[in-house]
Structures are given as C-alpha cells and as structure tokens.
Amino acid sequence: SIGVIAAVALLLSRDTGYERPERFIVATSPGTRNVFWAPLPTLHDSTLPPKDQVVQNGQVLIDGAASRCTGWICSEHSDWGLKEPVGLALFQKGGGNAWLYVSDPKVGFLYRYEVSLTWRKTLEAGPQEVVATDLKASAYWLAVDGFGNIFYTDAEAGTISMIAAEDVSKGLKGRTLLSSKTLSQVASPAGLAADATALYWANLKGDQSTGTLLRSTASPLSLANTSNSSNASSSSAVTLAGRKMAGKHYIFQAAAKDICLAGTNVFFTGDGKSLFAVKADGSSEVTEVASLKQPKGCSYDQETTLFVADQSLNGIYSLPANMQKLRQAKHVRKVVSLKGPQQIAIFYGPSSNKFLQPST
C-alpha cells in the first residue's frame, strides 16, 4: 500500500540522509537578471500524495542587479553584476562546494562563482570571477565535464569551444574543438553536453542532412588534442535526430536547442512545447516524453529523475529519466516555482558524494 511504501521510504531517508535537503536546483533567470536556487524533493517527499507535495519557491543566489561597481571605477576584478544570465554549468568539487559558471551574452562574459552549502542548509555564492570576455553575444549555452573542462558554443561563428580546467583561472581564450568550416554537421550549434566519451550538441540550423542533435565520434579530450593539428578536419559525428521524426506523422516544431544527458538517454527541447528523448547510441527513434509549455534547460540527478525548466510556466518540473524504453512520462510534476527559468543544474551536498561527476 502507499502507506507502507511511505513508511519504508521514511526509514530509508533517515539512514541515507535524504530527509535533509542535500540536493538543490540552480537556475538562471534572464528576465530577472538573477540566478536562483531551491531545495529539491527528498526520497520521502516523492512518496507523498500529490496534494501533500510541496512546491518550493526559488530564492536568489546571485542578484544580478547588485553590481559593486559602475563606469570607469570598475577594475578587472570588480563585480560587474549580471545583465542577462543565460548559460549555466556547475562543477561539483565535493564537501558541499562547487564552481558555478554563468554566461552573460549581453556583455559576452563568462563568470565563475564558488557556491557552498551553509550550516543552515542554504546555498550561498562567493565573489564573482571573470573567466572569459570573448564569448560575444551568441554564447547562450555552457557545459562542464567530469574533469572540470568548460564547453561553449557560438551559433553565429559555427564553433564549439573548450576552456581546459587548468586554464580556467588564467583568462586564456578557449580553443575551438569543432567548426562548421571543417565539419558540415556543425550548423549553428546551440545547447551542448559532454562526458568522458563524447560531445553532444544541438544544431539551430540542422536538417535531415546535417542533423539537429549529434554526438561526436571522438571524446572531448581527443578533440582537444587534435584541434590544432592536421587531423582536425577528420572529426565526425553521429546524427541522433533530424528535423523530421522517423516513423512519425508530425515534425519538430523547431530545431533542437537545449540538451542534457541522463544515463543512456539524451533529452532535448526546442522552441515548442515538447520534451524529446533519444538513446545516446542512436539505437532508438526520437520520442516525445512530455508536453509542457516552453521547456528550456534540463538536468539529471544521476539516479532516477530528470528536471526541466519551463520559462512560460515559471517553474522546474520533474519526471522519470532512467527509461529503458523511451515513452510518454506518466508523472510530471512541478517541484520549484520561480520566474522565467532558462538553464538549470543540480548542486549536491556533502553527503551526496555518489552523485558527483565521474572522473573517467
């Protein structure tokens, strides 16, 4: 019965620490100029009847309007505030600390903040650090891998670039990994994701020929090693999705934009109402797993749940992520309320070490 399941979940939560808010969502909100945070549901919370499940309110983590400098008095190390925070990536360092990267396309800057979990079980961000100033107005998407390398796209230039982890604090310009000049399957790249084996990206101008969602055949490290060599032109990619859905009677409402990895699945959204998924190895057809209103970025909790931001519905929604066979999700519920979220990431507390990025 539901009562028995809830009782077991509560006992488990007391043993594993799930009764405490050890997982948090972090989200950019371009319309408010802020970055928000909120605790995510615990294991016990997920067993409660819908009427008893609490929707958390987003709280300001970084106040974009609270710049500490103006005009000529701003130095290189000043806090510039945020004009239009969009791109977001989070690298978990462990011990309740993480590096949070935020891109601001309006000024073309990439910033870094150290985020930590306080004794009050709240998140706080340290001083703003400038990582890069050459991202231009098209850098709307960021990603980070398990090594701490930062990836970003430039849709106008048709490039996918990386700032190596060891170069993040040096102010060095990112190196181009893939370019439309050498690989036709790079067509105004947008959202991206990276793991140890491959780089994934969405194409704003993708079609049946170039693809709208792709996976590199080489690892990010291999791409970085060959980006400045004569082998750079030999890069290739596997198409996971084209504009038309194979075997279906409907087509994408727009090219893919935002993507995230969840085990063996890749989830993505465009300009329409749909959240799509496809197997990372390309072994399945594209499937619509949920219909919202204006879904944007998504993030996987490394266990069973996917979280997706909906800009129009002003909230973060949860749904099952570890589907062996892709299908329409039966349980999609709002877990966080905040204004106009765009990109999201999950922060883990010190007792959640098993959820940290893999090192291999």
Image: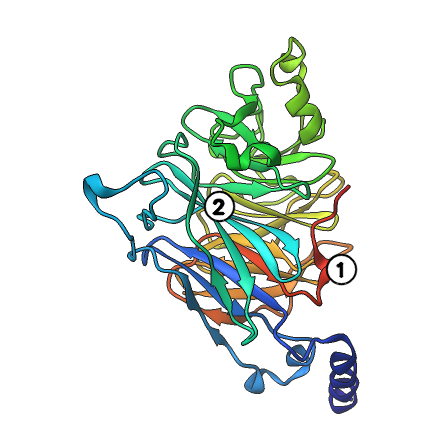
Q: What residue is drawn where x is 46% and y is 56%? A: 126
The percent coordinates of residue 190 (x first, y second) are 49, 36
Q: Residue 79, relative to residue 140: is it above or below?
A: below
Front residue of this view, candidates 218 and 3: 218
The percent coordinates of residue 230 (x first, y second) are 65, 8
Which residue position is annotated with label 1?
354
Which residue position is annotated with label 2?
270
The percent coordinates of residue 170 (x first, y second) are 51, 32
Q: What residue is drawn where x is 66% and y is 77%? A: 46
Residue 313 horizontal side relative to residue 106, left or right: right
For the image, the number of numbered tags is 2
Front residue of this view, candidates 242 and 123: 123
Q: Residue 324, relative to residue 220: is it above or below?
A: below
Looking at the rendered image, the quarter that the N terminus falls into is bottom right
Residue 215 horizontal side relative to residue 25, left or right: right
Which amino acid does the dot numbered 2 rest on? Answer: Gly
* Mark 1 neighbour class, 10 Å CA radius: few under 14, some 14 to 19, many 20 or more: few
Task: Decide which of tag 1 and tag 2 comes sooner along the chain.
Answer: 2
Secondary structure type for disc 2: loop
**Residue 241 in view, yes or no:** no
Question: Marks 1 and 2: which is nearer the front?
Answer: 1
Residue 4 horizontal side relative to residue 300, left or right: right
